[in-house]
Amino acid sequence: IPLKNYRNFIIVAHVDHGKSTLSDRLLEITGVVDPEAPNKQVLDKLDVERERGITVKAQTVSMIYHYKGEDYLFHLVDSPGHVDFRLEVSRSYASCQGALLLVDASEGVKAQTVANFYLAYSMDLKLIPVINKVDLDTADVPRTEEQIESMFELSRNDIIHVSAKSGLNVKYLLPKIIENIPPPLHCRPDEPFRAQIVDSWYDSYLGVIMLINVADGSVKKGSKIVSFKTRQKYEVKEVGIMYPDRTPLPHLVAGQVAYIIPGIKDPNTVFVGDTLYEAGTSVEPLEGFEEPKPMVFVGAFPAQGTDFKKMEERLEHLFLNDRSVTLQHATSSALGQGWRLGFLGSLHASIFKERLEKEYGESLIITSPTVPYKVHYKDGREVTVSNPDDFPDSLKKTTISYFSEPYVDAFMSFPKEYVGKVMQLCTANRGEQEEIQYMSNDQVLMTYSIPTSQLIDDFFGKLKGITKGYASLDYEDAGYKPSDVYKLEILVNGESIDALSTVMHKSQIEKNSKEFVKRLKEFLRIQQFEVAIQAQANGKIVARETIRARRKDVLAKLHASDESRRKKLLVRQKEGKKLLRSIGKVKIPPQAYQSFLKAR
Ligand code: GTP
């Protein structure tokens, strides 16, 4: 099949608008999968994804289609819909020339449609608008057409109406793709081999498998290729396309998005975005992708009785297939040796937290999520702090000029009756309104600038709550803004517990500190002596709870009138307790931390 007959495309859609269902239909039409086969939704491979119905890892699949006497090779590149995975999303977009912009006829244009449209548009992809679910009673096709026309400036006449469920009109999509989306003509088949790594995953038998976008030349089994970044040389063991599973081919050529097996076991030497080229040639690297930058961090510590080494092996194994999670060693005086995990965004973090809890349950203690804050020193230094315990005490402010925290632009769409409530929620979360758009179908699209730390504090859950589940949310990084943030420490009998430190905005200290000490008290109840639980911010104690020692009521048998004797007894009891208080440090069982952190 000649290069001019290649079409690389993507489906852009809001969650649940039918991307997977439509992909399945296209694979059936082109004979890649059997319509009778039970295992549908080929594209969503990981279990978690299937459970939560969201795509995390991009999966690509190829199709061959006969049209007007010629064969066409399609690469449908899947991408996660959520912008937490923006880098994976742009990586997938970069290997394509066009996109199907899929909109649910009953729901219309939503937050994620808009966010993904902007990205596709900025990357110069040719867009084909498609309205899905026209079979539904609640479908409102004219209204959806109007939205597509006004928001994306796409012509109504170009819109295709389909039902991915019944298959209605899906057959018109492939000719439309051929006619409208250009082939990857910038690729140069006659030059030496050069390709970019789009994705990589690990197979316990074959080792690393890479999905590559071949820009120049060709590659086959036995080819000697080199990584631009590591200068490591590989001898290719197998090449092929995903059809829908790995299907070996004699060679891959320019313009294809396909897999190669380099025969290596160590996934840490493979970098998505890296350029591969033919050994012995000298080439320029293909325009690189940025390394993913984690935006949410949690601490993880082995609970009592869990072996550190074994747990580390299990964690590394879990993250083999997700290179966007960063794993570093961390030590806590309260919880011992552990790890600091970095995630791309709040959804990403919550998926993994759920996965860790499910797989490792009681054997892992996970601390509260935090965003990376910046400390700006007077001498111009700028330090990023992703572990709250490393956040400087504001008392040392003499050398510090100010702090800043990351923000996002949050796009929210919901029915207009909820405008008031959503504004209240955003304000309570330190948001600032940037834009509000009333759309034709009683929907509102609102943009707020919100601190990322508020977003990861279950903002989406709260938003869904106040809109009876109707709201959708998407967001984009919006850089750092100066902020009045402080470290909030929890002290037990004067000693700070590092694993419980958090960083938060001044306005939240009062409420949170009271709540924290109260909650910790619940989990520390039984002690032999008096324990003070305090919260400290900016060098000042801001909240306190006391756990009284289990005391005998020395006054119980006395007459109320026996004043002097009464005083004497109390004094004696007080002295006794002083003695107890000086006995050693408070021993806090790790389970207490676990319960405290879980209750957050
Ligand atoms: P994510 O993978 O979470 O992004 O979702 P998706 O966009 O892939 O949506 P999916 O294909 O999983 O479809 C979501 C729901 O809509 C499923 O219950 C589908 O059965 C249903 N659905 C998809 N297309 C149609 C359609 O044309 N008509 C009707 N009635 N339902 C549809």
Image (cartoon, rainbow, N blue to C red):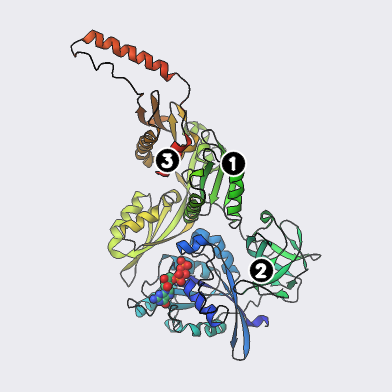
Name the residue that disc number 1 marks: 308
User: Which corner quadrant of the figure contains ligand 1?
Assistant: bottom left
Q: Position of residue 188 (x, y in %)?
A: 71, 75
**Residue 372 seen:** no
- Packing grade of label 2 (10 A; few <14, some 14-19, many >=20) is many
Query: Considering only order in the chain, which callout, 3 or 2, is on the residue closer to the N terminus?
Result: 2
Which circle marks residue 237 in the picture? none
Name the residue that disc number 3 marks: 595
| Distance of label 3 from label 1 (alpha carbons) | 21 Å
Q: Position of residue 533 (x, y in %)?
A: 39, 30
| Secondary structure type for disc 2 | strand
| Secondary structure type for disc 3 | helix
* Amino acid type indicated by mark 3: Ser
| Secondary structure type for disc 1 | helix
On-image quarter of the N terminus: bottom right
From the viewer's perspective, is the residue at label 2 or at label 3 nearer? 3
- Identity of the residue drawn at 41% across and 30% down: 540
Query: Considering only order in the chain, which callout, 1 or 3, is on the residue closer to the N terminus?
Result: 1
Q: Nearer the viewer, residue 502 or 351?
A: 351
Discs 2, 1 touching: Cβ within 8 Å: no
